Image (cartoon, rainbow, N blue to C red):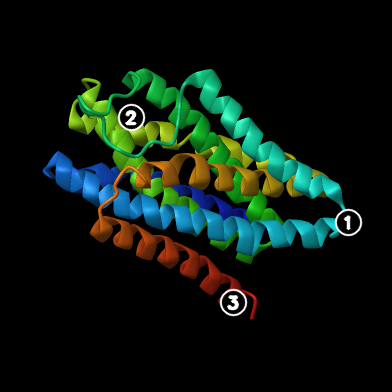
Amino acid sequence: MDQSIIFSFVGIGAVAALSFLGFLFLGLKPEKLKTVIMVLVSFSAGALIGDAFFHLIPETVESAGPKDINAYIYITLGIVIFFVLEKIIHWRHCHIPTSEDHPHELGVMNLVGDGLHNFLDGLIITSAFLVDINLGIATVFAVIAHEIPQKIGDFGILVYAGYSKLRAIWLNLIFSLISFAGGLLALFFAGNPGLLMFLNSFTAGSFIYIAVADLIPEMKKDHSLSNSSIQLLSILLGLGMMLGFKLYLSE
């Protein structure tokens, strides 16, 4: 079996396994959980932006050529399509557990959105590995950085919606396995370099949208100097991690 295929499905499996993170937060008080998640959200924003600008976009432009406008069109399309998806299914990348002060859609709606999200994760992870193993590794880490607060938030939403804590964890895992279907679809189109270029450009656009339209606005709700400083540091750590991968993996 091709090495890139093995790596891609190991990466997808690692992301799916994050569903068990709910076990670590069973006894954590809501306010403490919110603080932990906001630090992770800040780190995630930096990692997603870093992967888009340090890895995905340079790789796409290099493969397509700097004068190929299609790469930039596909990046823009990723931003627009994610905006449309959120409008259609009333789903957004909110990572704050549901409470009376912060309500969400019912658990079923969250699961539908999460299933689509996971399908896209599998698609973009595999397509990245098919282009270049180093690009795939960086993309897996970016997805993991984003999925950690996402999975914890999903767990809180499902519990608030009436599911038991154990059932919420298993539902998160089951819907995470949909990512393998996305990976298989990417393999089906593996012989089409133009499509892989589109998928990586689309991924860059979606990462930028998630970071700028969903994650950063959540962070801006807290105006305290101490928390803002922690958020900034976390963003810089996420960016630094992606820049480090770029410098290390390109050697």
Q: Using the image as rendered, state which of residue 153 and residue 76 is in the foreground.
A: 76
Residue 63 occupies which quadrant of the picture? bottom right
Observer-side mark, 1 or 2, equals 1
Residue 16 place in picture, x, y as percent: 42, 44
Q: Which residue is mark 3?
A: 247
Dot 2 amino acid type: Leu
Dot 3 amino acid type: Leu
Q: Residues within 10 Å of mark 1 (few under 14, many from 20)?
A: few
Residue 165 place in picture, x, y as percent: 19, 32
Q: Using the image as rendered, state which of residue 12 and residue 22 is in the foreground.
A: 22
* Labels 1 and 2: the sequence-earlier one: 1
Q: Residues within 10 Å of mark 2 (few under 14, many from 20)?
A: some
Quarter of the figure that contains the N terminus: bottom right
* Labels 3 and 2: the sequence-earlier one: 2
Mark 3 to mark 2 CA distance (whole Å):
38 Å
Q: Residues within 10 Å of mark 3 (few under 14, many from 20)?
A: few
Observer-side mark, 3 or 2, equals 3
Q: Residue at x 12, y 42 (%)?
A: 29
Mark 3 to mark 1 CA distance (whole Å):
25 Å
Dot 1 amino acid type: Lys
Q: Which residue is mark 2?
A: 171
Mark 1 to mark 2 CA distance (whole Å):
45 Å
Q: Is residue 190 visible?
A: no
Residue 55 place in picture, x, y as percent: 63, 62
Q: Which residue is mark 1?
A: 67
Query: In the image, is residue 113 above or below residue 146?
Result: above
